[in-house]
Image: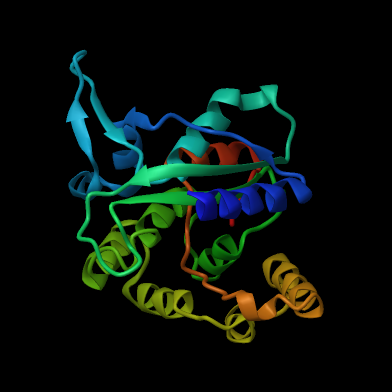
Amino acid sequence: MRLRNWLFDHFRDVSRTFGFEEVDFPVLESEALFIRKAGEEIRDKLYCFEDRGNRRVALRPELTASLARLVIQKGKSVSLPLKWFAVGQCWRYERMTRGWRREHYQWNMDIIGVPGVAVLQELLRSYSVPENSFGRVCVIIDKIEKIPVDAIKKGLMSAGISDFAVEELLQALSIKSLDKLEEVLGGEGDAITDLKQLSSLAEKFGYSGWIEFDASIVRVLPMTLALCSRSELCCLNA
């Protein structure tokens, strides 16, 4: 407990140093909140049950879904950008492996309300993915490494992406090098420019060895994406 408190104190000190405000969310949430984010298959990984009011509820498996709900509830009553962090206890009903337990703590640092174009948006645009399909495609991409690749391809094609574009998009999403991504997108886009500046700063401050680029990570709910499309918001999750 002494070690855990020491570690969590450092989490909080670092977050506050960079201007993040601490928030917290209910341990018990609506089961539908997580199903909406990850699909029906997430139910098998939840500690879920029906309460005395006949409501389907679940112990939270993560914090991101609750964060999105809170942002939507606050709406225009808060000024953007938001810089929130949380250290929360989570549960997942999964097979335990080395370093992965059914009960764990999660440290989130989130920035909500950043104007501009995200990398994934720019990548999808290069493959002619319609703007109105962005949210649906993000939900599918979020399941990469969680479901078979054939299911990912089927989902992307059902979202209106051609067979050829699906293959090219999946290859691009597997890129782990910013230089290689620049070859795909070109160096003129805002997303590449911003990432190159971030990479340069990280190298100058000695943090580059701690950073790994991954274009396939999506951490937003469909309802958050809908909010983003209306208000030109982006959610960055550390």
| Residue found 26% across the figure and 28% down from its top | 57
Q: Which quadrant of the view contains residue 23?
A: top right
Residue 186 appears in the figure? no
Quadrant showing the C terminus: bottom right
Question: Going by the image, does 221 lie left or right of 152?
Answer: right
Q: Toward the viewer: 153 or 6?
A: 6
76 up-or-down from 221: above or below: above
Q: Toward the viewer: 141 or 112?
A: 112
Q: Toward the viewer: 101 or 78?
A: 101
Please name the colour scheme applied to the rendered image: rainbow
Q: Which quadrant of the view contains residue 122?
A: bottom right
| Residue found 58% across the figure and 86% down from its top | 180
Residue 85 appears in the figure? yes
Residue 29: x %, y % from top left: 35, 30
56 up-or-down from 12: above or below: above
Question: Going by the image, does 2 lie left or right of 187?
Answer: left
| Residue found 37% across the figure and 72% down from its top | 166
In the image as oriented, which residue stretches furthest toward the front?
Answer: 2
Q: Toward the viewer: 176 or 6?
A: 6
Residue 133: x %, y % from top left: 44, 52
Residue 208: x %, y % from top left: 68, 79
* Number of numbered discs overlaid on the protein picture: 0
Question: Going by the image, does 6 lie left or right of 173?
Answer: right
Residue 138: x %, y % from top left: 43, 55
| Residue found 21% across the figure and 44% down from its top | 43
Q: Which quadrant of the view contains residue 156?
A: bottom left
